[in-house]
Image (cartoon, grey):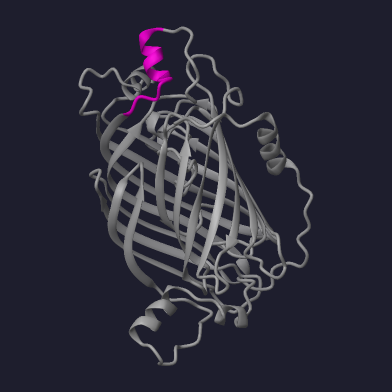
Amino acid sequence: MKIKQFSKISVVLLALMAFGEGYSYGQAIKQQDSLHKDSVKSTYDIADLIHQIFRPGKPQKPAQKKSGITPMPSIAYNPSIGAQIGLKAVAGRVLGHEPNTLMSIAATSASITTKGIIYFYLAHNVYTPGNRWNFQGSLVAAKTVVPDFGFGIGAKVTGGSPEEVILANPDRKGYVIHGQYYNFREKVYKQVMDHLFVGAGVSIDIRRALEDKSNPDGLTPYHIYSKEKGFKTDHYLANGFLFNLQYTTRDNQNRAHKGIYADAGLRVNQSWIGSTKNAVQVTTDFRKYWSLSSKNPEHVLAFWNWGSYLVSGTLPYLELPGTGKDANYRSGRGYTVGYFKGTDYFYSELEYRFPITANKFLSGVTFVNVQTANDNLGTKIFQKWQPAGGAGLRILFNKATRTNLCVDYAFGNYGAKGLFLGLNEVF
């Protein structure tokens, strides 16, 4: 069942949240986490639950500032991948003993899903003592099954050739693209002043053995776009240099109570380093967190805006920005990855986070989001919006790092809906 479009007031509210700054930070962050030792001790997480079940009555080791590697089952579900099972290991610690050092985070996972996806990744976000350097990177190898719903934002079609209508896919008919995906990405940031970093890096994206097994005639959005733009339909490379400017005052990387995160980036794909086509993109990522209570700082209003805009050149179809195409593939709850996409894309989300139990073991969220993109039949970005919304439950997995297990139910237009499971907050 379709939900109604957001009113003009809602869209204006999100725009003001994105661009209207009127906040104060107070003092600079003194440590990687604003939780004091006593509040950490009074907090209850899954480790406490396991200890209570298997070692009742026995004293527990005190909480540690630095958390080691934590292995766990990797169980998740969302409409893009189906049900997932595998193994995951996560770690979070502060490197060194200097103040003003943010927590470093690393994660790895190997998994398989009910939709035939086999996925391995290794990711890190490391801050050296004093935040002098920040290293962000990932390595991915996967056998993928990519759902595809066409190019654009689902605007009504009033003209165009049969191929143009298929590409715009106004009814959001579903297609499935099988293939292999390999990615290597590494960025190095240097702190140039408090909270401000400049960075550069490289991203290598390789797609191989691409095919739509259900449509051998090739009349699919992927084939039509690829042939029109001069890409082979079975493989391509998108290799580029990354240049970024980042500003952050978040008090925690996993679940911020306050602060800001902003990143402006430039990606330059170049054929002389192996990219099939040249392209220049601009990306923006803005996040703001307001703690609504000094007594219970877990009451948080959080805002996120992510955008990507093609300046010149040509992007492969599966690399177009769109739903769930942010760095962590978490945007657009309510829709599958790539449900809407274009050469220009703009996304905003507003979330309210609140505690449920006094020991912080359970908490909840409610959220709304909107997204817009251009299409091939004249619809411009900001002309048509697609909304979604939902609510979720949070289970505290690691109190030292504020790591949560997340369960969200979200719904959007075209009957889109689903249960989204994951580790750590969406943003």
Depth check: give the residue in front, 323 or 30.
Answer: 323
Residue 39 position, x and y percent, is 61, 78
Depth check: give the residue in front, 275 or 68.
Answer: 68
The quarter of the image holding the N terminus is top left
Residue 64 position, x and y percent, is 51, 82
Q: Is residue 205 magenta?
A: no
Depth check: give the residue in front, 272 or 216.
Answer: 216
User: What span is in magenta?
Assistant: 161-174
Query: Is residue 13 found left or right of 208 in the rendered image?
Result: right
Query: Is residue 300 found left or right of 62 in the rendered image?
Result: right
Q: Is residue 172 magenta?
A: yes
- Marks counted in the figure total 0
Any part of residue 309 in sight: no
Q: Looking at this rendering, what residue extends furthest in the front direction? A: 1
Any part of residue 339 in sight: yes
128 versus 387 height, above or below: below
At 24% from the left and 47% from the top, the residue drawn is 114
Which quadrant would residue 172 be assigned to in this image?
A: top left
19 versus 44 height, above or below: above
At 49% from the left and 16% from the top, the residue drawn is 156
At 56% from the left and 77% from the top, the residue drawn is 96
211 versus 84 height, above or below: above
Residue 224 position, x and y percent, is 34, 18
Residue 336 position, x and y percent, is 40, 38
